[in-house]
Image: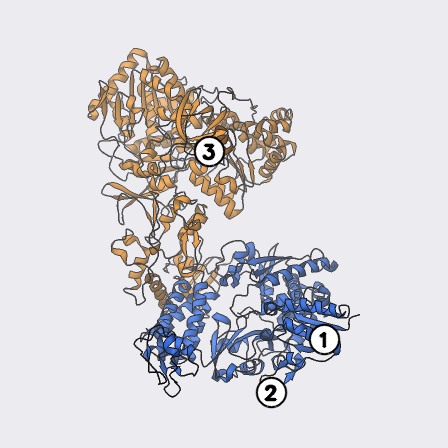
Amino acid sequence: MQPVTLTINRQEVSGHPGMTILELARESGINIPTICHHAKLAPIGACRFCLVENEQNGALLASCVTPIAPGMIINTESPRVLEHRKMILKLILASHPDSCLVCDKGNQCQLRLLAADLGIGLIELDRIPQPAVTEEVNPFIVRDMSKCILCARCIRACQELVIEGALDYFGRGFKAKPATLNNFPLEYSECTFCGTCVALCPTGALMEKEALYRGAIGDAVQTTCPYCGCGCSISLEIKDNQVARVKPAFEEQDNQEALCVKGSYGCDFIHSPKRLTKPLIKVNGDFQEASWEEALAVVAGAFNKIKKEHGADSLAVLGSANCTNEENYLLQMFARCVLGTNNIDNGSSLYYNATLRAFSESFGFPGITHSLKDLEQAEVILLIGASPEASAPLVNYLIKRAVKLRGAKLIVIDPRRTKLTFFADCWLQPKVGTDLALLNSLAKVIIEENLIDHEFVARKTDKFQLLAEILGNYPLEMGEAVTGVGVEQIRQAARLYAAAGKAAIIYGTGITQQALGVESVKALINLTLLTGNIWRKGGGLHALQRDCNAQGACDMGALPDYLPGYQHVGEAEARNIFETRWDVILPSTPGAGALEIIRQSREGKIKGLYITGENPLAGFPQAALVKEALATLEFLVVQDLFLTETAKLAKVVLPAAGFAEKEGTFTNLEGKVQVIRKAIDPVGESMPDWEIILQLAGAMGKPLPFSSLQQVMDEIRELVPLYRNDRETNAPEEEDLWDTRFDYKLPLKTFPGFSLAEYAPPAGAPDDSYPYILLAETSLYRSGSGVRSTNSRRLSKYSSSFKLRINEVDAQKMGLSSGDQVRVVSPDGQLQAAVEITGSLPEGTVALPRSVPEHPVTGLFSSLPEAAAKTSARKTCYVRIERS
Amino acid sequence: MYEKQILICAGTGCISSGSMHVQESLSEELKKHGLQDKVRIILSGCHGFCEKGPIFIVYPEDIFYCEVKVEDVPELVEEHLVKGNVVERLLYKDPVSEKRVFSHKDIPFYSKQKRQILRNCGVIDPENIDEYIIRGGYSGMKKALYMDPLEIINTVKSSGLRGRGGAGFPTGMKWEFGYRSPGDKKYVVCNADEGDPGAFMDRSVLEGDPHAVLEGLIIAGRAIGSDEAYIYVRAEYPLAIRRLRKAIAQAEEYGFLGNNILDSGTNFKINIKEGAGAFVCGEETALLASIEGERGIPRPRPPFPAVKGLWGKPTCINNVETLANVPLILRNGAEWYSAVGTEGSKGTKIFAVTGKVNNTGLCEVPMGISLREIVFDIGGGIRGGKKYKAVQIGGPSGGCIPEELLDLPVDFDSLTAKGAMMGSGGMVVMDEDTCMVDLARYFLSFTQSESCGKCTPCREGTKRMLEILERITQGKGEPDDIERLEKLALSVKDSALCGLGQTAPNPVLTTLRYFRDEYEAHIFDRRCPAGVCKDLLSYYIDPELCIGCRACTKACPAEAISGEKKEPHVIDETKCIRCGACFERCKKGAVKTR
């Protein structure tokens, strides 16, 4: 395309067609002040502050929305422009309160900065009182509409970035304001308190509520959100060694547009008064504070003794999907080199294992196929077994943006009606637990109707005939009978998916935590292989992850069967690399996984356990058995931020530092390795996990060969193929951009193969005594086992109730009304909850929120390990409901 | 075989003055006299002379009865239809010569007009497509269907037709942009969101000649390569909507709409979208947003709708009156059309004349006619023999034209040069009793409350201007208010996002330009020369005229009037609240204002 040449302020400049005057001016180093404009939002030309004059014809143009044209003679500061610009600002100031002295926005207020810049003081127009503060009870956002200047950034943020549509213009003319539907408080709207509008508000109209610190802060540290697997870049504002405020790091990161409520307002757990500040040693059943030397000596002594008496495999380590890559790397080294056992796993294995297994078996390597950015190219998105609106909000935004702004088609497979089903072109509602039958039916239609990518299937895959033959045996009507989804609907969805040039699949724990988790993931892989959607941009498979570093913990080998980089412990060649480097003999048989560790502890086979950053009592199935198992241990040491239910059972509790108090890296669900930076000093005497591990290894007499975190990072880069970084290592800015995804294809040695798992009805089908299917739902306001979200003051304040959601028909049958107290009873446990009647669940299905430590819903599930995935069905179980 | 035809006006104006009851009563009377097979009643569209409705015309004699009431019907039937005598008392009476006029052609209100667009209004039955066709309807479309799109565009271009919605953009050029914009789907939109208070020509055309608009749309569609149109019409026009729907159904039945129109291979579909009556939705981008189901707020241009319009597709938006011109141009040729008008403004324009003139109503005049002719010939001069002061042209966004400019030729460019604008053709005539500051305040209060609130200058600026104007009319004006007002007005005009904001200051700017002395009188002398601004009035009793009847004393709620019986009374200005009760009550005209 021909560049467009024009003049701006007597300077000849050229840009590409379609550029706005503002863009070109800024690129050329000419500043045009703006108010409503924001780089993340589509320009609307509302404030008119960026007016410039085209001296060619005397026209005044809003530079943010006017495309450049050849021959324009633009003056950004002609007397006319300046006069109008001042007038606009005066007009805005005239309906804005004079409360700058007490306004928390302080020197960060753009209005105030612009007024100072243009030299506008007192204005001659009368002040007109504006509406007062909107009454709101939520603990996150406070709206003071008297300070609103109607730049509509909040409206656009809500409608363009997070696509919630909670805010829109309300009223007309001078009375126009951004508001919710019917001008209700935010909590009665679609608002999810993501805080994007607050971050974008140029004035003090939208502010964070109940913040730790009032006023504007200059110092900020960019790091990575510690909650879900999306790995959003956040900016921590620091004051007096405290994290005062969290904001999306959009200035720093191009791809960061919005956070969720947890990222924006949930990090206040850092300064919870309940944080552990000193090591604790249990003496006669009570914890007593101790020094680090004492505590570590007790742990080291106990581990050495157990190892000596019962062998290395009587010890085990449970790593954490919330700890950094470096810490997990050290932890698996600690297990393998110091303790000498492969008994190591991390909490993500309870949901991520199905993906790891299925990917290894189908692709020959467990890894990531696509980056989230690729979703921007997808023509069709198939969402199954996932609630990204709760578990991965960033992915939720991406899906909605693709549908609303780009016209992508969405297929949702979910028995529940969710916010995303309203965006779907096709919504299939299979019976709970029958996804595999449905996915096989989709594959059958694709083959039957010849919608496959023949070239891809023939050249790049294996075992297609086998799949075609077996699927040929099942009539589609059988799929309908099992899943309850009509044949026509199945066909429609299959055609939609297969017809797209680029179709992506997103799945979550609704798939991986099923009894047939591995098989279901394989069935998803079949779909991508049939349609050639595997290495195509905009295609692929995206597995949602609950924890911020589930991917990293697994990549680092905090797994019973894999060394770092998914190099199997049984392969001598792989072991050899690490043995040479570490100068040890590594155990070669796979160790016990998470649930197996619990089982063996209960059986007395495992006697000593080291848990870092995990809370099995609240997160693992059959809480009663877990408690029994942990109590049976000879020695339990727990390393955490808080005195969790699990920690209370420990002999020694070690206080760990949180994500804001240490350095390291997290790997998000798309395989992006991101830096976390130290923003404040560790709380109390707590120490970063990596330091504790190193000191413990030292105390046990087998020091690990690292004296700094940098050395650990370097070794990871050297020994873990995925993390090999070709760029200059001493360019620290670039570390944020490490990207394992690019290396993904390297280890692929075989053709990806089709595999067929036939659907089998689950064991323990409903009988009269347990007539309901219980779903454990992820909640937006909670995370993981709930340790941090419960200790976030604002999150727990807003979402403290524990409710059983139940369909209105079922509620009627039982004569239940909202608020009634009931007992939810499964064969493995029971819980008390209040009833909430809903229209979004199908009949016969009830739902409880997970991640509430005091009511661990996972405790209702059976811990029967499902053979291949070594996970049990943790998403659903059969229950009955009793009045209490 | 009918012997006579009677046209009863069924435009909104005449319906509200009772024409439907007249029609019912006429049918009954005809039956009584056994004339139902000899006299045919036709409900016509608006005649424009709404002031004198209901209008009742008897053909073939062409006798124009006006202000016909139900109780007049028996006499009309008995006298005129049975006996053949004209009922003179129901004829139009010329206000000057006081003579009765038999035919509408002899009424000055009509004789100065050139009714091209309104040719069918009041003549045909708008609900009967055949009547439209008989008068040449759809022949322009027929021609266009077999013309090359560029040929159509060139015809419209050389006709000199400019958009009648307000801005006066050349229609042919707009179509060419639409034609040249690449797109698999294009739209034509008819803007029938007539929002100017007092303007109702679009409504009259839609009600009186809906097929003309449909024909215009089909031709526009053919020209730019569109197969679908929307008519955005305000929901407050139920009759227009009903007639449009009927017309569309008839056109579809005749094969003028739908697939493969008259075997030409052209497809065309027309949808109706009812608007909720926000003034800003007449702005084209807000109108498009409203059709899309979004809040009606303007979007920045470029991209212009011709490039990226309805649902992102190239879209041509034309006003009702513009579209009604199009069939004529196609039928009679560009040369015929451009024979009427001035250098830069061709054809005719419909104005809605209201205010202090004798004849109010719709009139269609050739471009270039002088304001004087409209006000004094067609409008019949100022009511009650008062003095002419100004005319506000172009609705609330237009401007005031004072007496010294009465000979100004009315066309797009002359009006703009004087600070007013053609707008949609509203024309409010004002006499000496109108306060120009109050008038500016009134029009600004309209645009201010219709501002959508999106852009700062319009949202905040119009509010502030209104605040200053209110202050002035309340007698609280400050010395530098005029300068402040002028600065604000210029800023809003220059920097607002859409046409609404850019034109909202016009009434203020033109009154400041032509009637600055009135502002100064309000501010410096605390006086309203026209005697309108209540807070600046003072009432007094003329002792010469007062007979001391005490009527005013009783009417005064503030006990401000005193005086002995049968002696002249006096108003205590310190107690007077200026309610005007005494003024209204006094039968002798002794209470006066100053």
User: Please, what is the three-letter code of the amino acid marked with disc 1?
Assistant: Glu
User: Please, what is the three-letter code of the amino acid marked with disc 2?
Assistant: Ser
User: Please, what is the three-letter code of the amino acid marked with disc 3?
Assistant: Ile
Mark 2 secondary-structure assignment: loop
The tint of chain A in the picture is orange
In the image, residue B187 sits, relative to residue B167, either above or below, namely above
Tell me the chain of label 3.
A
Mark 1 secondary-structure assignment: helix
Residue A489: quarter of image: top right
**The C terminus of chain A, quarter of image:** top left
Residue A596: % across, % down? 40, 18
The tint of chain B in the picture is blue
* Pointer 1 residue: B78
Which labelled disc corresponds to residue B97? 2
In the image, residue A207 sits, relative to residue A371, either above or below, namely below
Residue B555 or A65: which is nearer the viewer? B555
Q: Which residue is depicted at the point 46% across and 70% down?
A: A57
Q: On the rendered structure, is B328 left or right of A694?
A: right
Which labelled disc corresponds to residue B15? none
